[in-house]
Amino acid sequence: MNKSMLSASLLALALAAPLAHAHEAGDIILRAGAITVNPKADSSSVKVDQGPLAGTDLGGKATMDSDTQLGLNFAYMITNNWGIELLAATPFEHDVQLKGTALPAANGKLGSLKHLPPTLSVVYYPLDSKSAFQPYVGAGINYTWIYDESLSSEAKSAGFSNFKAENTWGLAWQVGADYMLTDHVMLNAQVRYIDIDTRATVENNSIAPGTRAKVNVDVDPFVYMVGLGYKF
Ligand code: NI
């Protein structure tokens, strides 16, 4: 056998070999990995919306730090190319800071909050189901449940109370890829952009009785996940 015949037969063998089947109608895929929510956290200025000072613009902005948790995807292939997917995770916790407001006592760590951002998406896998590499794009609906808002001890001693942030609905976009290591086990990496626009309020009766301030926060995080998947 000469060289070109050898490579031709190797190619034929490779094409005929039973490739790892990926992503066919009826498949259930479970993925797990490290998931990071990195908020963009653009916000409006902080405004007094209740109490004798209502209408006062305190300026400044609110920011949030990032957090990493255990992420889970439950995916179901409806056809060889289309699937639905639910994103779940252990609860995220973010510190909330106020910066540059006209109230020096309000600047710094206001507190923290927890949230769960379940997201249901429709996902499109453009490649043939025999491909071991399966990139995908998806779009879906996110509900972000925000809970356990708590004030820092500094904010409490500055007279703040009753910190709250509203739950939100928004659209979510994603790109990702699976790479089949075996017929069942895959590597996965994915990035999402989730539109999370919330409104946070906090009271302070020591400035003036009944004073409440509000800030509209476009949390709008990029969400990164890297992990392993298993196809049933
Ligand atoms: Ni937004």
Image: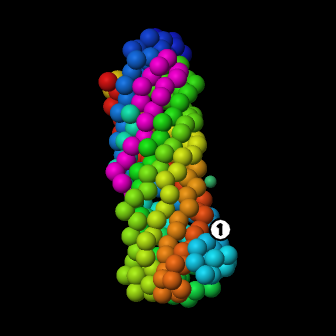
Disc 1 residue crowd, few under 14, some 14–19, many 20+, Cα 10 Å = some
Q: Is residue 91 magenta?
A: yes
User: What residue is pinned by disc 1?
Assistant: 44
Magenta part of the protein: which range? 75-93
Rendered position, 178 above or below 64: above
Instruction: Return the x and y of residue 51 as percentages of the image width and height.
Output: 58, 78
Q: Residue at x 54, y 79 (%)?
A: 211
User: Which quarter of the frame holds ligand 1?
Assistant: bottom right
Rendered position, 24 above or below 142: above
Rendered position, 152 above or below 186: below
Closer to the camera in the image, 136 or 146:
146
Quarter of the picture holding the C terminus:
top left
Quarter-of-image position of residue 127: top right
Closer to the camera in the image, 195 or 12:
195
Q: Secondary structure at mark 1?
A: loop
Observer able to see residue 49: yes
For this view, does 217 lie left or right of residue 34? right
